[in-house]
Amino acid sequence: MPLTLENIQQKFRECGLKSTPQRTAIYQALVQSTAHPTAEDLFAQVSPTYPMLSLNTVYYTLSVLRTAGLVLEVNIGHDRARFDANLSPHHHVICQGCQNILDVMDPRLNRLASPSGLPDDFEISSYQVAFRGYCGACRKSKISMTTSPSGKRPVSS
Amino acid sequence: MPLTLENIQQKFRECGLKSTPQRTAIYQALVQSTAHPTAEDLFAQVSPTYPMLSLNTVYYTLSVLRTAGLVLEVNIGHDRARFDANLSPHHHVICQGCQNILDVMDPRLNRLASPSGLPDDFEISSYQVAFRGYCGACRKSKISMTTSPSGKRPVSS
DNA sequence: TTGCTACATAGGAATCATTCCTAAACAGGA
DNA sequence: TCCTGTTTAGGAATGATTCCTATGTAGCAA
Ligand SMILES: [Mn+2]
Ligand SMILES: [Mn+2]
Ligand SMILES: [Zn+2]
Ligand SMILES: [Zn+2]
């Protein structure tokens, strides 16, 4: 099933969500992306089509979609919140240079045994593996960046 | 080796760090804790002994210790930064009720194979597994908390 | 022991992502 | 078509973290 407008609107109806142009555009932009964008990324992408769009609405919409279970908040580190409409179980790798986040679909990671050594009454409901490293582009430019501890984004897809 | 003052001061010297009362107290508080405290947690703990201590100094000290490799920033989610002086490789579980973070020392988790499906030029340098769930105390009180999406901390320490 | 100097501290202001507040617009059902 | 509860936009508020800067001081050398 491709992501036609009717498809999105039906998904909203199934979740009991009103279907508005802004909400549809924000969700569609997120579904089409594999970059795990921030609220501001989505705002920048949808804004040209809806010049009246408020960043506030993006935040509100994302919280609604998250509550409905259509969107996941994928935060690696404690910087800006990043979002993911890919609901299939998977993990992530973040480039410490450009901060780009890639999906890691390796099915072995979805079978990790419950960890030992926890209190008996602690109940694990989920887990996420966050890999860190450097992408090819950032590895090449890493030599010249001895000063700043956190690099800028050279390539952002 | 217990954590005497001389021990801490020697460790600072080995890293080329000046040894000040504030710095020593902050690091000592972090070493003694297993709670992965925030900067403000540490400020609250050290403040009574050093009433002139600035929260700013806590942030600066933590960044210095992190750069020196004596302290790790353990951020699960993108909320406040939390710190860890436990340098042995391990992972974490966070209670979604009280936000307490526990260490997960299961050695199996330190042997995960490099994930498949990544671009060839991506170089993984580390990874961290973050488990989520509910501790015993929060499970018991979860029934009465249908309204607030993120609960308060019932037990902290 | 004394003096120098680079680093550390404290306090205030600035930053910035996110949330709160509120009035107007509107989607969806009656 | 009308009503009502939701959604939106915009402005203000919040709060963690960083920036700026003057003063203090640890560690080294004379
Ligand atoms: Mn993803
Ligand atoms: Mn830990
Ligand atoms: Zn990169
Ligand atoms: Zn708990």
Image: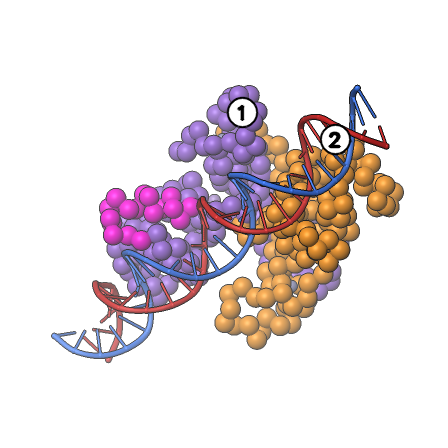
Chain colours: A purple, B orange, C red, D blue
Q: Is residue D7 above or below residue D25?
A: below
* Label 2 environment density (alpha carbons within 10 Å; few <14, some 14–19, many ≥20): few
Q: Amino acid at mark 2?
A: Gly
* Most distant residue in the right direction: B1
Q: Is residue A104 above or below residue B145?
A: above
Q: Which residue is mark 2?
A: B16
In this rendering, does residue B48 appear at all? yes
Quadrant, the C terminus of chain B: bottom right
Q: Which residue is mark 1?
A: A145
Q: Residue at x 51, y 45 (%)?
A: A79
Q: Amino acid at mark 1?
A: Met
**Mark 2 sits near ligand 2, with its Cβ under 8 Å away:** no
Q: Residue at x 57, y 24 (%)?
A: A146
Q: Position of residue B113 (x, y in %)?
A: 64, 36
* Label 1 environment density (alpha carbons within 10 Å; few <14, some 14–19, many ≥20): few
Cα separation between marks 1 and 2: 23 Å
Over which residues does the magenta segment extend? A38-54
Q: Residue at x 39, y 55 (%)?
A: A59
Left/right of residue B150 with respect to residue A66 in the rendered view: right
Q: Using the image as rendered, state which of residue A76 and residue B11 is in the foreground.
A: B11
Q: Provide the secondary structure element on which disc 1 rests.
A: loop
